[in-house]
């Protein structure tokens, strides 16, 4: 099994769900798909530092429902919800459709691969040593209770003339095991020396009946206890 398959796409339809949930006729499909991409790009550009790892879009006949998953809901909601109302009005003007915004707070930001990748990218922009940035992020992930983490950086690391790739792994990362909740994230750091790509894989534990165990102990979840035999006849 090669290592070039995106873990979330590999598990799509089995343990992962789609980010866009709607059905359209063949003639309308490309238009609505392009609209989804523009919506996501607009929101991510407007709130670059709000920690938005996932944007889910649902469509009904006359309405578009956008679920914004964020680690910093206060920035998007604003005072008395003014910022949400403003964003809703902008999206309605942008798409010409009736919009509904729902803010979902990310429960464990330290176990979200996209947020960790963005954090590493921000540290690189502040001229932090890439080795220190990797170590700090991996410590944060493992302390949060994750089973394993893998970080890979590519580019002109440390301002070197030639680009190279640095990789660090801690714990277990079984990428080819479908029933493991492997979260994947990617971010780009546009430094003065050049562009650096940050990839992060996080093992959040096994799935049990389609639900991630997250905080469950690895040994307890992977090796179920055998029932004790009774010696009574």
Image (tube, rainbow, N blue to C red):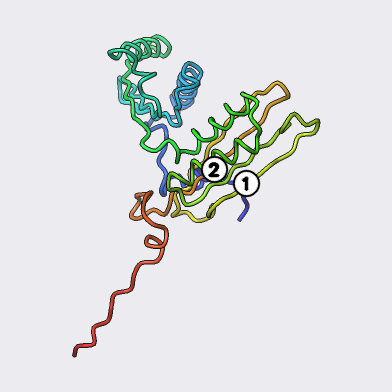
Return the x and y of residue 169 as percentages of the image width and height: 59, 49
**Crowding near pointer 1: few (<14 within 10 Å), some, many (20+)?**
some
Q: Secondary structure at mark 2?
A: helix
- In the structure shown, which secondary structural element does the residue marked by tag 1 occupy? strand
Q: Quadrant of the N terminus?
A: bottom right
Q: Is residue 27 visible?
A: no
Q: Residue furthest left?
A: 233
Mark 2 and 1 residues: CB-CB less than 8 Å, in contact? yes
Answer left or right for 19 relative to 124: left
Q: Position of residue 23 (x, y in %)?
A: 37, 32
Quick check: can you spot residue 21?
yes
Calculate the distance from the C-alpha at mark 2 to the C-alpha at mark 1: 9 Å
Q: Which residue is mark 2?
A: 138
> Between 218 and 186, which is closer to the camera in this rendering?
218
Question: What number of labels is visible?
Answer: 2
Q: Position of residue 209 (x, y in %)?
A: 33, 54
Could you say which is closer to the camera, residue 131 or residue 103? 131
Q: Quadrant of the C terminus?
A: bottom left
Q: Quadrant of residue 82?
A: top left
Q: Give me the disc on residue 168.
A: 1
Q: Earlier in the sequence, mark 2 or mark 1?
A: 2
Q: What x and y, as percent, mark residue 146? A: 45, 48
Q: Determine the residue positioned at 71% across, 25% down.
A: 194
Nearer to me, 199 or 157: 157
Location of residue 47 with respect to 172 vertically, above or below: above
Residue at image point 59% right, 28% down: 123
Q: Nearer the viewer, residue 198 or 55?
A: 198
Residue 123 is tagged as: none
Q: Residue at x 32, y 15 (%)?
A: 98
């Amino acid at each position: 099994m090669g290592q070039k398959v995106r873990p979330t796409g590999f598990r799509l339809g089995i343990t992962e769900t789609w980010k866009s949930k709607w059905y359209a006729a063949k003639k309308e499909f490309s238009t609505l798909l392009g609209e989804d991409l523009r919506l996501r790009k607009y929101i991510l550009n407007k709130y670059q530092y709000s920690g938005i790892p996932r944007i889910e879009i649902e469509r009904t006949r006359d309405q578009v429902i956008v679920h914004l998953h964020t680690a910093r809901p206060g920035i998007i909601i604003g005072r008395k919800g003014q910022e949400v109302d403003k964003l809703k009005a902008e999206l309605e003007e942008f798409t010409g459709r009736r919009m509904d915004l729902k803010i979902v707070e990310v429960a464990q930001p330290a176990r979200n691969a996209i947020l960790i990748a963005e954090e590493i990218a921000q540290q690189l922009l502040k001229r932090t040593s890439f080795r220190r940035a990797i170590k700090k992020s991996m410590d944060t992930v493992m302390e949060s209770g994750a089973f394993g983490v893998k970080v890979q950086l590519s580019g002109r690391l440390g301002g070197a003339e030639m680009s190279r790739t640095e990789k660090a792994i801690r714990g277990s990362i079984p990428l080819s095991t479908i029933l493991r909740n492997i979260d994947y994230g990617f971010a780009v750091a546009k430094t003065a020396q050049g562009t650096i790509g940050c990839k992060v894989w996080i093992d959040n534990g096994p799935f049990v009946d389609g639900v991630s165990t997250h905080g469950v102990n690895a040994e307890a979840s992977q090796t179920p206890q055998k029932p004790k035999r009774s010696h009574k006849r």
